Image (cartoon, grey):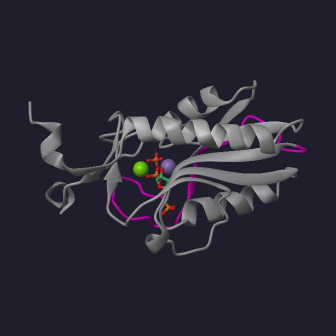
Amino acid sequence: AADIADDLTDVLVTEEQIAAKLEELAAQVAHDYEGKDLLLVGVLKGAVMVMADFSRALPMLVPIDWMAVSSYGTGTRSSGVVQIRKDLDTDLHGKHVLIIEDIIDSGLTLSWLLENFASRGAASVEVLALLRKPDAMKVHVECRYVGFDIPSDFVVGYGLDYAEKYRNLRDVAVLAPHVYS
Ligand code: PRP
Ligand code: MN
Ligand code: MG
């Protein structure tokens, strides 16, 4: 089999760095939402790993729901056209919603989601994103909890894919240009 390492250049964020950061963010979230009706909403599919590790780092019980949207399809660039593939099962009325994302790239997915959730009667809507690309953002998105700001390289792993591949890598790594060019 071809070596996965041939498809990657640098490891950008290691499994250990991710775990430590999520512990840190979980402590902040536990403090900020004390006594509040918190609901975690993960954005499928990229946020699966972040949700699994972040939610278990929280020191309290919390309900989890999922939204499946896609703006990338199989390409490398956001189209800005967001499609709902699976809607929430939960009524957001009165809930303090924390959206869990793997990455904010152009910001188009989240800005669309924030607008969508705002109309559903949530008490508050905030965002936790493991990764953010400040130089790639096309729209401003208020993100209360950010793991790491990274350069605008195409990154994969820990939930992030290229054409549905690489999601199950433990680290976040830069995809070698020869893979997608
Ligand atoms: C990726 C990523 C974020 C979004 C960020 O999802 O997981 O959800 O793109 O990009 P943006 O800020 O430019 O909108 P994708 O649409 O690829 O679906 P996936 O999570 O199933 O991979
Ligand atoms: Mn996604
Ligand atoms: Mg994707």
Residue 159 versus residue 12: which sits nearer the camera?
A: 12
Q: Residue at x 40, y 46 (%)?
A: 160
Q: Residue 44: in sight, yes or no?
A: no
Residue 10 percent across, percent down from the top left: 24, 52
Q: Residue 59: in sight, yes or no?
A: yes
Residue 78 percent across, percent down from the top left: 44, 64
Q: Residue at x 30, y 41 (%)?
A: 165
Q: Residue at x 65, y 38 (%)?
A: 26
In the image: residue 160, left or right of residue 51 = left
Does residue 133 show up magenta in the picture? no
Q: Residue at x 38, y 65 (%)?
A: 151
- Determine the image quadrant of residue 179: bottom left
In the image: residue 34, left or right of residue 6 = right
Magenta segment, principal secondary structure?
loop
Asked if residue 98 is positioned above or below residue 39 in the image, the reply reads below
- Determine the image quadrant of residue 118: bottom right
Residue 50 percent across, percent down from the top left: 53, 38
Does residue 92 show up magenta in the picture? yes
Residue 148 percent across, percent down from the top left: 49, 54
Q: Which residues are magenta?
A: 70-94
In the image: residue 35, left or right of residue 171 = right
Quarter of the figure that contains the C terminus: bottom left
Question: How many badges with numbers are in the image?
Answer: 0
User: What is the residue that sits farthest to the left in this orientation?
Assistant: 1
Asked if residue 1 is positioned above or below residue 116 in the image, the reply reads above
Quarter of the figure that contains the N terminus: top left
